[in-house]
Image (spheres, coloured by chain):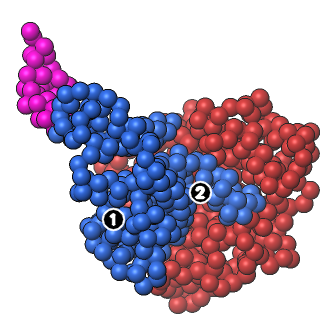
Chain colours: A blue, B red
Amino acid sequence: MSWWRTPASSTQVTHGGRLWLYVLAAIIMILLIIPTFLVIPMSFSDSQYLEFPPETWSLRWYNEYFGSRKWMRATVVSLKIATATMMVATILGTMAAYALFVSGHRLAKRIFMLLITPMIVPVILIAIGTFYAFGKFGLNNTLTGLVIAHTALATPLVMIVITAALRSYDLNQERVAVSLGATRIKAFFQITLPQIKFSVVTAALLSFLTSFDEVIVAIFVSGGSTATLTKHMFSALRDYIDPTIAAISTIMVLVSTVLLLLTQAIGKK
Amino acid sequence: MNESSIVDSALPISIRGLTKQYGQLYALDTVDLDIKSGEFLTLLGPSGSGKTTLLMAIAGFNRPDAGSIRFGDKEMILTPPHKREVGMVFQSYALFPHMSVAENIAYPLKLRRVNKSERRERVNKALDTVQLSGLGERHIDQLSGGQRQRVALARAFVFEPRILLMDEPLSALDKKLRERMQIELKDLHRQLGVTTVYVTHDQREALTMSDRIAVIDNGQLMQVDAPQVIYNQPSNAFVADFIGESTMIPLKRTGNELFVGDERVSSVPDTPAETDWSLVIRPERLMVEPGTADRDSTLFFNGTVKESVFQGETALLLVVLDDGTEVSVRSSTGTATPGITANPGSQVQLAIFRRDIIVVPTGNSQR
């Protein structure tokens, strides 16, 4: 009864005075989360079409997904590409972030900005550009091509995460290690890397997700036997509306959520 | 065990014509410096003077534009830092937080493939030396500032380098601990016998610890001498002003004689002719109302007391001389000589023995 009269914080604003803030926050959270969660009940529908709420329940669309060679092949393609992207982007991004952080070169800041442009430029432009560039080198519809394109998208994330980690790290530790007799490479692997390893793992998971969830570039540069899961989902939605999509989406939401929770748990350590 | 020298032979360092330029600015300007084997030499200067640049050049972390650095008779200028065999202590200590105290100290031994049992023995000995016996298993974040300092030290000398470099290692500690560590470091240096180059901007620290002090400003060495010489016979105005408290009074020149007011101070020192000269007065060398008046051995000043301040172990008297110069007088507050106090506005006579007089060139700075 008197709950809204009690102060919400040390500012003496009461919970009642904050009511508008609570409502606004609730609306924003609902708008952000509902679309994601709507798909979950739809995936357990027994109907031929996507419908909400479902009238009868079943697991048939999950069976459909796991039983389809086409879906399974696309899933394997996506996992392969995401794994390769994760490895290449994490290594390249960490190297770039470290080099630019340590160098102190007058162009270092600009090179950093240049390398993170893929995060700023609309992805559709990157997709179109990549499609034409890959055409010249015969990289369209190849796994290599997709990994290259996804690496370009994931590297900026890796660089930002690693640079943030290096900011709170005392580089003198590496100097000490060198003065004690370690080569610079040794000093990096024995002293620096162990201390930023959680950020490296976080960066790796984020770059995996970047590739695994990516659809726009994939639509342009993948196809046939190299089509990714997301590309298949997109064309499936366009051609026939089929609740298998909902089942796959649910699985992807689950995978993404688990990975993100994992990165958070790691970050807390 | 601790009394014997851990390091068999220390190395002298010989620096010639060392120059490092950042754009138009000279961080080091043709520095020549000989550091003797086993010596504790302090590089002392204000921030931006080039003292850290010089230390980092000795360590190999920056490459000078010109000049030579030799350890013993070996030229090191192109040797990468990990091959210089130099122990180093940083201001931030830079301990490895993902390793225990013992692992931190064992790191340089591991790099040198020292076997496990010898490693443990030497780590324990190093821990004994820095009075941290039994703390080897601790984590770095369980240590106090002073303990971290000691671990950083132990890590720097455990592999028996013949040169030890320290970059303001005590500046993060509070005053009391810093003063205790100064004595401990000096003691440790005596035990190890290793050539030590120490960087600080704190003149008291430099005076306390060093065999010799190299005063550096604008990338140039201003004076390199023992602490007593640096304090008692500064060779120029910068050193006189930077080390200790001092008042400078410009001197008038008549022929070959220097005067303050009508009082003859000294004859012109025989170094460069075309410079101006100043009298440097240390506040603790001034006497108040000396009584006896022997003009041959003593120089007199008359002035008015401006302020009288009690500061604990000493008392400070600010006096404006008749020519307008403000000087401070410091006296001990011990029972034998209770601190001299005087009412502001009262007339006072000051005196200084001629043997305590310091005359330095001020004009066109030579050197």
Q: Seen from this angle, which residue lies furthest front? A: A48
Q: Measure the alpha-carbon separation of dots 2 and 1.
A: 47 Å
Residue B122 is drawn in which quadrant?
top right
Give the residue pinned by disc 1. Answer: A219
Where residue A165 sits: x, y (%)?
Answer: 48, 52
Asked if residue A33 can be seen in this view, the reply is no
Mark 2 vs mark 1: give the one in front.
1
Which numbered disc covers residue A4? none
Callout 2 crowding tier (Cα within 10 Å): few <14, some 14–19, many ≥20: some
Q: Is residue A176 left or right of residue A212?
A: right
Residue shown at the point (51%, 80%) measured from the top left: B22
Q: Taking B211 as reference, is A19 above or below it?
A: above
- What span is in magenta? A1-29
Residue A44 is drawn in which quadrant?
top left
Q: Chain of mark 2?
A: A
Where residue A138 sits: x, y (%)?
Answer: 46, 80
Q: Choose between B21 and A71: the one closer to the eye.
A: A71
Residue shown at the point (32%, 53%) measured from the top left: A233
Residue A16 is drawn in which quadrant?
top left
Disc 2 residue type (three-letter): Asn
Q: Chain of mark 1?
A: A
Q: Are marks 2 and 1 in contact (CB under 8 Å)?
A: no
Q: Choose between A226 and B54: the one closer to the eye.
A: A226
Q: Is residue A146 left or right of residue B30?
A: left
Q: Is residue A19 magenta?
A: yes
Residue shown at the point (46%, 63%) measured from the top left: A225
Q: Is residue A108 magenta?
A: no
Where residue B198 sits: x, y (%)?
Answer: 67, 59
Q: Is residue A25 left or right of residue A219?
A: left
Q: Taking B254 as reference, is A243 above or below it?
A: above
Q: Circle 1 sits in a helix, a strand or a loop, which is it? A: helix
Work out whether disc 2 and disc 1 sit on a shared chain: yes
